[in-house]
Amino acid sequence: MFESSNTLTPTHKNLTRVCELREPMAPPTSLHFFRKRQTFDALASERPQCLQSVYSIVKEVVSSIETRVRNLEASYYEPIGTVEADVKQWQIPLQLVLRPARYSGLVSMQQLSEIAERHADTTDSLKVDDGSLTLVQSLVNKALKAIREGFSESIFFVQKLLEYMKKYCVSFSPHEGDVYLDTATNYEKQRRDLEKTIRMNIESITQTADKFESDSLTIHHFNPAIKEMAERLRIEHSPIALAFTAACKSMRSACRGLVMWVDADSVYPEYLHYDIVELEEKKEIQTRIHRDAQLKANVTEFNAKVLKKCVRECEEEMKRLKPKEIALQEEEKNLRAASKDVLEDLTIKEYRKMEMKLTGSIGDRESQERLELLQSEILELRSRKPAIERRIADLEKQQAWISSREAHREQKEKELERASQELRNCRRHARKAEVELQRVEACLAKLKEIHLIKTSSETLKKIFHNMPVYSRLTNTSKNKKDRLQTLCGLVASELDGDWTRLYRCLPFYPRRGDETVSADIDDITGRFLRNTKEQAQQALSRWRRMHTRACVGDLKEALVAIKRKDILEKFEQHGKKAALRRERTMSPKVHRVVHFPKLSTVGMKRKQNTYLQF
């Protein structure tokens, strides 16, 4: 039967030939250990290797559950093979049992028991077919047994998978949030809906049997697909006939929900990455919009301040010209009165001259002298009139120039009002752009944090050991202060009245002139009187808003320039204390050291030789 052992053992020459034909192998430098493949049972006692292993386990268990459901269906419909044929064997016995009892359908176990008791009672007039009653009872017991015993293990596995999925396949996001976090919030909603639907499906399996045994089972307890099937097969008044079919469909729906959850969780980091790329582009665009809006607001503010200065100069000029205008008006009034008097005197004297010529009373010497005197007075009056008129015209020109300056002031006031309105609009637009930029930055930081946690290999370890998922170094708090904000708060509380000197030493980009800086100081001083701390806070806040490159170094240089190094020393001490607190919170706990006994080298060599034998 068998060949001898000599034929099976290769000779030395053949062994040498085989070794020569083999590919040369590099000598092993170290032992290669491979972690065993994780199983469903191992998830309860050890952390998952990665999310992919969780996905694989879920899909394998779901596949086994579906196979079990198919086998259960095959065994349940074994003589017939289809749902329609199974329902047909219910219809005639149910009619023979329910019609004598005047029932339209079978909805509860109590109803069937009552029919059986009345049939067994000899004094009761109700008589049904024995074979039909026995067949209906056996079909009902078969359906209830298949539901309770056939699906118990599958329900257990689905519940365990739900626990693992809820534990490891999470979104790390609330179900409501910003529009930019749409992927994370939508996945969280989807995850909750899937979990709720899966639980409803597996709970409906046992609830069907419970309702039939304790209360009443109607067709409204099933989903629309089973309702349609019951109406098509004309068994809607006795839904127990489709209870097993509904249970199989619910179990398949639960399995399909688990697979959908796994698929959604597997592509979740990829979609987060796409959102991060889009938000980074949005951040660049919004940064440019905010910068342009800030520059436009600065230019508009400069124009408004120039107009305000021009209006103030015009008002001062008009204050100076007001007495002169009054004097000119008074002088013009007097000159016009004098011109009127000269004109009247000239008219009267010319009339007298003409009268003297007409009456001929100029023949004597005395009359001749009067005429000559009258003539000289007329000439004098005629010579005075042009001078008065020229002076009046000169006064009118001067008053017209003053009026033009007044009109210029009014025009500048209107321009200032329009510029102030434009400045308010520009500031509002810049503030909106700043808020939108901060919103984009916060959402981008949140998405990066979620993506980092979701793709980190340490997340599953932290979840398994009930450790906090968020790192201490992760900026999860919106109110966490940066170094510049901390220094600004310290400066505002310690600076007192030196804030004006500090504000003049601070750099600005875009550059602000000395007059603009002085106007800022006057504005802050006027709005926040007798509160130097609030004035300093407002000044530093305005500097951070107007200076697009604000940093800690600029503020330190300004403090050194005004000789306030004491504030810098306090800031450094505060930083050292904060670093010590971080070291204390981040230092690992002290554990006891376990000393293991030394192993002999002989045993190690022997064990190494044993491992190297392949």
Image (cartoon, rainbow, N blue to C red):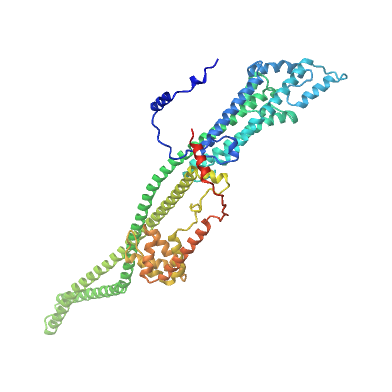
Above or below, 608 against 83 in this view is: below
Q: Nearer the viewer, residue 35 or 215?
A: 35
Point out the residue furthest to the bottom here: 366
Counting from the top left corner in percent of width and height, residue 366 is at: 13, 84
Counting from the top left corner in percent of width and height, residue 189 is at: 55, 40
Above or below, 388 against 287 in this view is: below
Q: Nearer the viewer, residue 315 or 468?
A: 468
Question: What's the residue at 35%, 69% (across, down)?
Answer: 561
Quadrant in which residue 505 is drawn: bottom left
Q: Is residue 137 visible?
A: yes
Q: Is residue 361 visible?
A: no
Quadrant in which residue 495 is drawn: bottom left
The answer to whether residue 63 is left or right of residue 271 is right
Counting from the top left corner in percent of width and height, residue 434 is at: 42, 53
Question: What's the residue at 43%, 52% (across, down)?
Answer: 432
Q: Nearer the viewer, residue 418 or 479?
A: 479
Counting from the top left corner in percent of width and height, residue 202 is at: 64, 32
Q: Quadrant of the N terminus?
A: top right
Tell how many labels.
0
Q: Nearer the viewer, residue 589 or 134?
A: 589
Point out the residue furthest to the right here: 123
Quadrant in which residue 250 is drawn: top right
